[in-house]
Image (tube, rainbow, N blue to C red):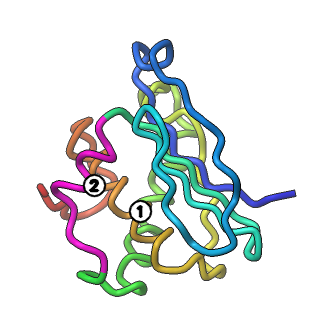
């Protein structure tokens, strides 16, 4: 069974307009853009998969995110651990936090080396999410 990291922040309207294709797994870290602003990264050797479905994220990533290499992998891992921890806490409190924003928990294990690309995309999604949906998961959030 594959370990999965899912980040889903789908606006109700987009549920009816999104159609995603299912590209094949690659042997190395690879970002695979698909229809409807879905970003998928997969690696059979490490048995993980990341799927980000959010209207506008791919455009934001290509136009506003810091370029790859700007932050170190350890920086991204530390930030992701904080963001994912708070995210998962909010998933468990649906009476307090919008279920449409925090629909699924994220399985992120700090003891696994997911590589730079996975950490880069998770980090940037968390920045995008916080700025787009006016949420604050932890600490200072760059306005990029």
In the image shown, does 97 or 128 lie closer to the viewer?
A: 128
Q: Residue at x 76, y 76 (%)?
A: 45
Residue farthest along the right direction in this orientation = 1
Looking at the image, residue 108 lies above or below residue 71: above
- Write the start and end of the magenta stretch as one range: 56-68
Residue 107 lies in what quarter of the image?
bottom right
- Percent of width and height locating residue 144: 13, 57
User: Circle 1 — which element?
Assistant: helix
Label at residue 74: none
* First along the sequence among labels 2 and 1: 2
Q: Residue at x 49, y 42 (%)?
A: 34
Q: Residue at x 42, y 19 (%)?
A: 14
- Percent of width and height locating residue 33: 46, 49
Q: State the residue position of label 2.
A: 61
Looking at the image, residue 68 lies above or below residue 65: below
Query: In the visual, does 83 lie left or right of 69?
Result: right
Instruction: Calculate the distance from the C-alpha at mark 2 to the C-alpha at mark 1.
Output: 8 Å
| Residue 59 magenta-highlighted | yes
Q: Residues within 10 Å of mark 2 (few under 14, many from 20)?
A: some
In the image shown, does 130 or 118 lie closer to the viewer?
A: 118
Q: Residues within 10 Å of mark 1 (few under 14, many from 20)?
A: many
- Percent of width and height locating residue 125: 36, 53
- Percent of width and height locating residue 106: 59, 52
Q: State the residue position of label 1.
A: 121
Quadrant location, the N terminus: bottom right
Give yes or no for contact between labels 2 and 1 (Cβ–Cβ under 8 Å): yes
């Amino acid at each position: 069974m594959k370990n999965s990291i899912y980040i889903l922040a789908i606006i109700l309207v987009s549920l009816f307009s999104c159609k995603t294709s299912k590209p094949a797994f690659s042997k190395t870290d690879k970002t695979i853009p698909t229809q409807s602003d879905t970003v998928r990264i997969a690696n059979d050797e490490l048995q993980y998969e990341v799927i980000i479905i959010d209207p506008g994220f791919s455009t934001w990533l290509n136009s506003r995110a810091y370029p790859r290499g700007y932050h170190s992998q350890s920086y991204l891992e530390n930030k992701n651990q904080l963001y994912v921890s708070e995210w998962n806490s909010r998933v468990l409190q649906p009476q307090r936090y919008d279920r449409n924003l925090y629909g699924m928990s994220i399985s992120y294990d700090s003891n696994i080396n997911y590589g730079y690309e996975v950490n880069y995309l998770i980090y940037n999604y968390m920045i995008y999410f916080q700025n787009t949906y006016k949420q604050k998961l932890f600490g200072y959030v760059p306005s990029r």
